[in-house]
Amino acid sequence: MGRRILKDTRREEIAQALYRCLLRKPFARTTIKDIAKEATLNHGMLHYYFKNKEEILLYFLDWIVALHLDDFRKWAKKQKLEARNFNEALSLALDYAKKKITLNEELAKIFIEVWEIALYHKKVRTKLQYVYTEWIGELVTIIGKETSKKNATTLSVATIAFLEGISLFHIMLSDIYPIKEILNSFEKKIESVINDR
């Protein structure tokens, strides 16, 4: 295995280790040693791949968005989303986002943590903006088939914002409110808003 490939593999393993660490405790309380232990690396060796914890987090965000976008694109290709009619493609894409992202409690927990960090840390905020811009772009591509780019962008931003809020509510309030039912209702409403454009 070449050095570059090994380095990329190790960096990905470290990102996965950070993911597991963040499920147990906040980033501020997660140490380099915790991450190294989870990645089964000597913590000194971890510094060969990353300068500090912040650099690991920034790489982690790139890794997680690449992973989920790649999964979505593979799924879209398998579903032949491009060839489907607009309503069907949109419905399938929203359903995918609901199941794989919005109702994914592990992912939501991690992104709540990252949001908190981004409030006070410009590099993390910039990286998080990139993450959301990528997801908005994917939705604009689908919605843009039936409306102007401006309308597609507005609807995509609103949809992603709603899905992120529902993700938080799913963790915090699902024992009080029928979150899945609300989400299903929203999907139908967003589809009708786009169709009524």
Image: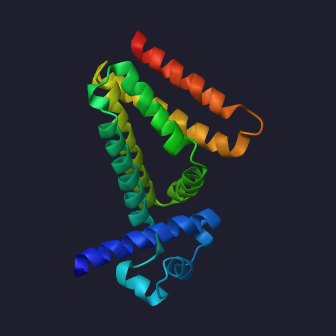
Q: Position of residue 167 (x, y in %)?
A: 59, 42
Q: Residue at x 41, y 87 (%)?
A: 45
State which quadrant residue 127 falls in.
Answer: bottom left
User: In the rendered view, would you say 33 is above or below 92?
Assistant: below
Q: Residue furthest right?
A: 176
Residue in the picture at 50% in, 81% down: 36
Q: Relative to 139, does residue 149 appear above or below in the rendering? A: above
Q: Is residue 188 above or below residue 7?
A: above
Image coordinates for residue 143, horizontal then vertical, percent: 35, 25
Quadrant of the rendered image containing residue 177: top right
Relative depth, front residue between 178 and 154: 178
Q: Residue drawn 46% across and 31% down?
A: 94
Q: Give the left or right position of residue 85, taking residue 57 as reference.
A: left
Q: Is residue 25 visible?
A: no
Is 109 on the left or on the right of 141, as rendered?
A: right
Quarter of the figure with the C terminus:
top left
Residue displayed at 24% across by 81% down: 3
List x then y, in percent, for residue 148. Answer: 29, 20
Looking at the image, residue 31 lies above or below residue 185: below
**Which residue is at the far front?**
78
Query: Could one spot residue 185 in this view of the protein?
Result: yes
Q: How many circles with numbers are drawn on the protein? A: 0
Task: Give the x, y percent position of residue 170.
Answer: 65, 41
Colour pattern of the rendering = rainbow
For the N terminus, which image quadrant? bottom left
- Nearest the viewer among 99 and 22 is 99
Task: Name which quarter of the figure residue 28 lies in.
Answer: bottom right
